[in-house]
């Protein structure tokens, strides 16, 4: 331990007056609260981004190859088999999408718009390992749980879907679906509007319906850039898109929002660090005789400046560490209690029902560096001013 650091610790440990104690506690609390606000805010934005990404990854495929014209089932299965030969691919299945209107038994005049995602194999989020055997004319289907609640249906019930009419016809084709379960993705658009059904049964029921493409699930959702080139080679004529490419504006907006909040709250931390400067001014005023005595014994202004700078850094650093600890603890507690939950109306706006607060170690490291730099900057100027005092005048001070 250097001499300057040891003397700084002694100055902080010695009996302090009411003014010094009050300013020191105010500085400690101000820096700690500003740091905790930074941690909680960035944890909130990280959790929000991860919640949306997780729901998108579960509801959509990681990669999808779309055909310019509808494909036959044989062609789609051939392309799916090629995809399964690529390392990193966990599943590949033909898929198509159909829009329609779900009849609400309690309100027949106001059907609900829905999207039917038809896949050859049931997605993992449906909880099914395979589609149930045919039972009558109704096609088995899994509904988003909020859609099922809106329609008032459950497993075993039948939902009638009105499909777009054919060209030159004004009659809406009727498609009966038998509910075999519900899914919960905690993503408003999926849970309120989506229906998942078997592709082969849907193609038999809807005349002229073809396969729109092939969706691919990866072992690592973030490995899209690695898997995409060989997949494009295996799928000539298909337009390949991934889950990140499908939502660029959303994630770009979240990154800019996170950066903006970080800058604003960093300014709040800078304002809080001025209390460290105030505490250091009080320390310099109350310890004038001590610093004067050190200078009289041969200590230079540079060493005195380092001692007082260490006082400010130790005081502010304790606040930063306390703020980091408090912010992480509050984030974990709010996540455990599920404090940030949205009712259905607000879930449509924020797209998710629940936002966890997830502290990111990289963010914590950046917060630690930024707040420490702010505290150091707030400590240098008062220490420099106090070190310029005449030692004779300081010794005469009472």
Image (spheres, grey):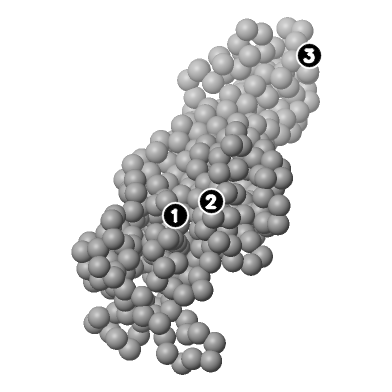
Residue 328 screen position, x and y as percent: 45, 36
Q: N-terminal of the two: label 2 or label 3?
A: 2
Circle number at residue 300: 3
Tell me the CA gap for discs 1 and 3: 81 Å
- Splitting the image into 4 quarters, where does residue 360 fall? top right
Mark 2 secondary-structure assignment: helix
Residue plotted at (36% across, 80% down): 174
Give the answer, above or below, for where 248 lies relative to 394: below
Circle number at residue 120: 1
Relative side of 35 to 332, left or right: right
Using the image as rendered, state which of residue 26 and residue 373 is in the foreground: 373
Q: Is residue 223 visible?
A: yes
- Asked if the residue at tag 3 contacts the one at tag 2, i.e. Cβ–Cβ closer than 8 Å, the answer is no
Circle number at residue 77: 2
- Splitting the image into 4 quarters, where does residue 81 fall? top right
Few, some or many residues within 10 Å of mark 1 (<14, 14–19, 20+)? many
Using the image as rendered, state which of residue 65 and residue 235 is in the foreground: 235
Residue 251 screen position, x and y as percent: 61, 54
- Splitting the image into 4 quarters, where does residue 145 fall? bottom left
- Asked if the residue at tag 2 contacts the one at tag 1, i.e. Cβ–Cβ closer than 8 Å, the answer is yes
Relative side of 169 to 329, left or right: right
Residue plotted at (69% across, 47% down): 232
Q: N-terminal of the two: label 1 or label 2?
A: 2
């Amino acid at each position: 331990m250097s001499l300057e650091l040891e003397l700084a610790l002694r100055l902080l440990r010695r009996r302090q007056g009411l003014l010094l104690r009050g300013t020191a506690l105010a500085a400690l609390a101000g820096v700690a609260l500003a740091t905790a606000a930074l941690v909680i805010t960035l944890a909130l934005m990280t959790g929000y981004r991860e919640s949306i990404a997780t729901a998108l990854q579960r509801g959509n495929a990681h990669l999808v190859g779309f055909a310019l014209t509808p494909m036959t089932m044989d062609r789609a299965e051939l392309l799916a088999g090629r995809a399964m030969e690529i390392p990193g691919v966990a599943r590949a299945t033909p898929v198509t999408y159909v829009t329609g209107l779900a009849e609400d038994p309690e309100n027949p005049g106001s059907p609900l718009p829905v999207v039917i995602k038809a896949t050859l194999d049931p997605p993992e989020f449906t909880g099914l390992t395979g589609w149930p055997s045919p039972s009558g004319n109704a096609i088995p289907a899994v509904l988003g749980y909020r859609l099922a609640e809106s329609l008032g249906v459950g497993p075993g019930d039948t939902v009638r879907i009105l499909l777009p009419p054919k060209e030159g016809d004004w009659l809406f084709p009727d498609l009966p679906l038998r509910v075999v379960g519900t899914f919960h993705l905690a993503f408003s658009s999926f849970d309120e509007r989506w229906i998942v059904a078997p592709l082969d049964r849907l193609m038999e029921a809807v005349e002229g319906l073809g396969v729109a493409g092939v969706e691919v699930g990866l072992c690592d959702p973030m490995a899209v850039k690695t898997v995409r080139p060989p997949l494009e080679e295996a799928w000539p004529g298909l337009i390949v898109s991934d889950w990140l490419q499908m939502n660029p504006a959303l994630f770009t907006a979240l990154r800019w929002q996170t950066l903006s909040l970080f800058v604003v709250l960093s300014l709040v931390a800078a304002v809080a660090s001025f209390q460290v400067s105030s505490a250091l001014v009080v320390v310099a005023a109350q310890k004038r005789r001590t610093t004067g005595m050190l200078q009289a014994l041969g200590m230079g202004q540079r060493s005195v400046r380092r001692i007082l700078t260490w006082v400010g850094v130790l005081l502010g650093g304790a606040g930063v560490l306390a703020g980091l600890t408090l912010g992480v603890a509050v984030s974990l507690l709010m996540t455990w209690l599920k404090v940030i939950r949205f009712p259905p109306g607000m879930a449509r706006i924020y797209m998710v029902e629940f936002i966890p607060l997830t502290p990111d170690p990289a963010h914590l490291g950046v917060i630690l560096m930024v707040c420490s730099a702010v505290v150091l900057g707030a400590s240098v100027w008062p220490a420099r001013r106090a070190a310029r005092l005449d030692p004779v005048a300081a010794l005469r001070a009472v």
